Each structure stands twice: as structure tokens, then as C-alpha cells.
Image (cartoon, grey):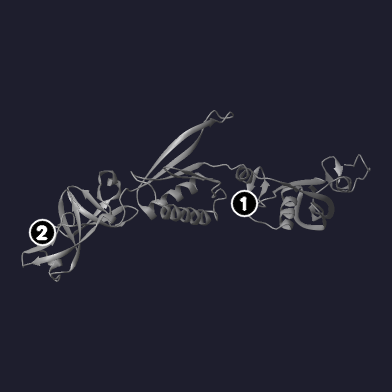
Amino acid sequence: MFCPECGSTDKEMVGEICIDCFLKDFQMIELPKRIEVQICSHCNSKLEEGKWSDEFIPEEEIIYRALERNIKIADEVSNEIINLEIDQIKGTLASCFVEVAGEVHGVRIEETHDCEVKIQKTVCPTCSKIQSGYYETVVQFRADKREIKPEEYAKADEVVERTLIKQSSSDKLAYCPQIAKLKEGYDYYIGSFKSGKKVAENLKEEFGGIIKESPRLISEDKSTGKGLYRIWISVRIPEFEVNDFIKFENKIMQVTSIGKNSVVAIDIEADKKHNIPMKNMEDIELLKKADEIETTTIISKSPSIIQILDPSDYSAVDLEMKDEFADYNIGDEINLIKIDNYIYLLS
């Protein structure tokens, strides 16, 4: 066979032409003369293959990766070695060259290609949301049948801030663009539902209470027809506090601690500790606040009776002697709480 381009009859043929004529116009790789890379000017995340990546990568590595993604190697090439070089960077434009060595039909050849990589500074969707004050969740901090105290608000602010700082390592929308300070409580606007839920859980762990979620339709995605929702999460902390007096299952108790999942209280008649599940919070009745505890004086005692003065009218009242009052003496002061006109002595 002879090559129709050069007339040679003694060379390897590639298709209908000889190897020399084939290699004359052959390119081992295809590479655009200009590549554009989008990088967020706020968080340095980059757009790769239609997706934003949060992984932090130095600018030079971003350029190298852009070159690698855009190189297309011809099927005829084998044993290729590719060398990427950045010649210079001026502002947002990098001048690069790519050296390629490989075998094509048994012939070792080399190529060099020039390329410019343009780094475009833009704003990623997440940072755009942050700038616009975007939020997915509202965490409502409320108290059951009472006003929230200033120190409770301060503690809640600390819990929210601490939670969002921890969440921010894995969630860019772990932020609070707004706090609405209402008469009934604070509303914390949280960027993502995931972090908002974590905030609510940590508030419950700090104060106890009940969490309820309520999704609300805000708009509709025109492309899919699906509804877009925001989630309101209510954290309702108990009406009672530590040292308050409550009634549960007909037992009168004094609260000793309030946890994430239960209330610990002491039966003031039987002196027995009880763990009440927090899910039963609505069945717990507040009887007296801790600041309603009164002090009186012991005026008489016997093995079975302890006599005190009723602080409301200074009349003498006989009460059953209990072991915890055995060491008290006449004239000592003792704490009491009056519930339903009955006096309970407190050790």
C-alpha cells in the first residue's frame, strides 16, 4: 500500500495514510485555550462540575485541578506522562503550559500546549443566603404559664451561641441572623434546620421542657411544583423551677433538679425521691414557688409532736414529729410551706 499524501510505500499505515502523515496533524490531548474557574470571594469554596465544594484548597492547586479536568487524551495514546506548569499569575489570570509525552502506534512523541486559567470571584449560593439573612428554622423559647427571667434569657443566648459555634465546623448555615425579642419569649432565627434542631435540643437539655415542631408553607418551587417550608420549633420550659413545690399523681413534692428528660422531686410527706418523665410536664401542677417558703419558731416538742407558731396568725400548731426534725430544739427556727391551709415542715 502507498500513502496517498506522501506516496510512501514502506511505512506503517494508520488507516489510509502512513504513520508520519498521521502524526503530522495528530494531537495527543485536547485542552481549551482558556479555562474559567468560579471561586466564592467570601468562603473560598469553588464550583466544580456544577457543584460547589467547601473543601479549602490553595489557589495554585485549584488551577492545577482545573487543567487536569479539562485535558482530554486521545484513544491512540498510551504510556502518557503529563506535566502541568504555572508560568505566572497576574491578578486573577494564570498563564500555564502542559507538556505531554506518550506513545502513538509505537512512536514516542511530545507536545506542549499553552492555556490560561481565569479565576472568577463570585458568591456561592450558601454565602448568598447568609448575606440575605436566609433562615430555615425559628426556635421559639417560651415558658409555660409564666414570664421568662432575665437570667434565663442570658443563659439561652449562651446556649444558642455555643451550639452554633460548634455546628459551624460542619454547617455553613449554622448562624443566627436575627433574634426577635417578644413579650412571650425570644425567637431565634437559625440558618439551617439541622442546626436549629440542635439549638432546640440543647435548650431543652439546659432548661428541661417540651419540644414541638411546626412546618409552615412559605412558597412553592416553580420548577418542581413542591412546597417550600420553614420549620418553627417551640421549646416550652416548665412553669416550675428548682425548689418550687409541685403536685403529681396526688403527691406533693419539692423540685430538686430539672433535666432534659425528667424532673427529680422529693415527696415532702414521705421524704421519697421521684423521677417524673418530662413528657408528663403538662400533668405537673405548680403549687407554690420557692420564694413562698416561710420561717417560724419551734415552741414545744415531744417524741411524737413538734409544736410551731403559724406565721400567719401566731397560733400554736401541733405537727407530727419526724426523724429529720429530732435534732431541732425549742426556740430554733424552721422552714415551712403552707399548701391548702396545711403546714409542711421542711428539713
Q: Residue at x 47, y 34 (%)?
A: 216
Q: Is residue 332 above or below residue 207?
A: below
Residue 151, compared with residue 70, is above or below; it is below
* Frontmost residue, 274 versus 107: 274
Quarter of the rendering containing residue 83: bottom right
**Dividing the image into 4 quarters, which one contains the C terminus?**
bottom left
Q: Is residue 221 left or right of residue 20?
A: left
Q: Say left or right for 167 vs 42.
A: left
Name the side, left or right, on which 52 lies relative to 8.
left
Q: Which residue is mark 1?
A: 54
Measure the alpha-carbon separation of dots 1 and 2.
Answer: 75 Å
Quadrant of the snapshot with the N terminus: top right
Residues at badges 1 and 2 in contact (C-beta under 8 Å)?
A: no
Indicate the secondary structure of the residue bearing disc 1. loop
Q: In the displayed structure, would residue 147 be above or below residue 151? A: above
- Percent x, y of residue 176: 54, 48
Rendered residue at 5%/64% (across/down) = 304
Nearest to the observer: residue 313 or residue 38: 313
- Residue visible at 35% across and 46% down in the picture: 146
Q: Position of residue 50 (x, y in %)?
A: 66, 42
* Local crowd size for mark 1, using a 10 Å CA cut-off: few (<14), some (14–19), many (≥20): some
Mark 2 is on which residue type? Ala
Which of the marked residues, 1 or 2, is nearer the chain's N terminus?
1
Name the residue type under label 1: Asp
| Rendered residue at 63%/54% (across/down) | 55
Residue 120 in view, yes or no: yes
Q: Which residue is mark 2?
A: 316
